[in-house]
Amino acid sequence: MSRKFLLTLPLLVLILFNGKKYEEAVIERLLVPVKVCVEGQDCGSAVQASQSVAAVSPAAVKKVELSEGSEHTVKMLNSGEGGQMIFEPAVLKVSVGDTIHFKASDMSHNSASVDGMLPDGAESWSGQMNMDISVTLDTEGVYVYQCDPHVMMAMIGVIQVGEAVNMNEIKTASNSLKSSFVMNAERIDTYLSQL
């Protein structure tokens, strides 16, 4: 390769990164949404943020609506709208007695309920690797499930069946689950805030 090409290659990488300037792309990926309030300020109406930190109000969280029908499909994916190693949709609201069909769209995934993160009296489940599994949810409350080999990457999902009667217990248990994540630790909080 020519010396000129080798000298311009790093410049090209810095200028273009998925159609954006490299610096902009990196900053976009590293931004952590926060809301900052100054003492004495009404936190409900005013938000301050530095130039390098995005500000998001609680009202900006899009709540999940009740899913129509009695059967619902959740895909197990390596990559989706919500990132890497993801269930799609990751958050569902369904009615008591509805059936969830977990589809192994990509290989090396399963769906398994998380111990201690189900409503009292609800049946747990554990699907086999690379296999679809269907689960009928007959107990009202919030269910948290995971992909066993990718739980450290926060490949989890949340389903609200009827009313969220066990939300306080789920939020308490989520701290323990978060401690097992090596990345995407905010997912559980984000998902729960959508219910």
Image: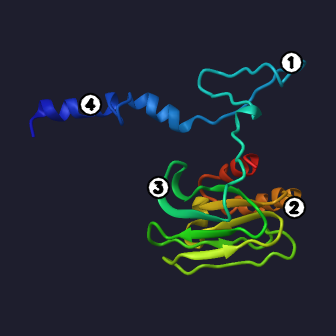
- Between circles 4 and 2, the one closer to the viewer is 2
Residue 171: image quadrant is: bottom right
In 3D space, how far apart are the residues under numbered discs 4 and 2 (Cα atoms)? 52 Å
For disc 4, the marked residue is 12
Residue drawn at (86%, 76%) of the image: 121
Depth check, front residue: 117 or 33: 117
Viewed as shown, does residue 146 lie left or right of 57? left
For disc 3, the marked residue is 79
In 3D space, how far apart are the residues under numbered discs 2 and 1 (Cα atoms)? 33 Å
Amino acid under disc 4: Leu
Viewed as shown, does residue 38 lie left or right of 81? right
Amino acid under disc 3: Ser
Residue 74: image quadrant is: bottom right
Provide residue 46's location: percent of width, then percent of height.
78, 19
Mark 4 vs mark 2: which is more N-terminal?
4
Residue drawn at (73%, 49%) of the image: 189
Give the numbered dot on residue 41.
1
For disc 2, the marked residue is 166
Viewed as shown, does residue 61 lie left or right of 141? left
Does dot 1 land on a helix, a strand or a loop?
loop
Amino acid under disc 2: Asn
Provide residue 58's location: percent of width, then percent of height.
76, 34
Mark 4 vs mark 3: which is more N-terminal?
4
Does dot 2 land on a helix, a strand or a loop?
loop
- Between circles 2 and 1, the one closer to the viewer is 2
Mark 3 vs mark 1: which is more N-terminal?
1
Q: Residues within 10 Å of mark 2 (few under 14, many from 20)?
A: some
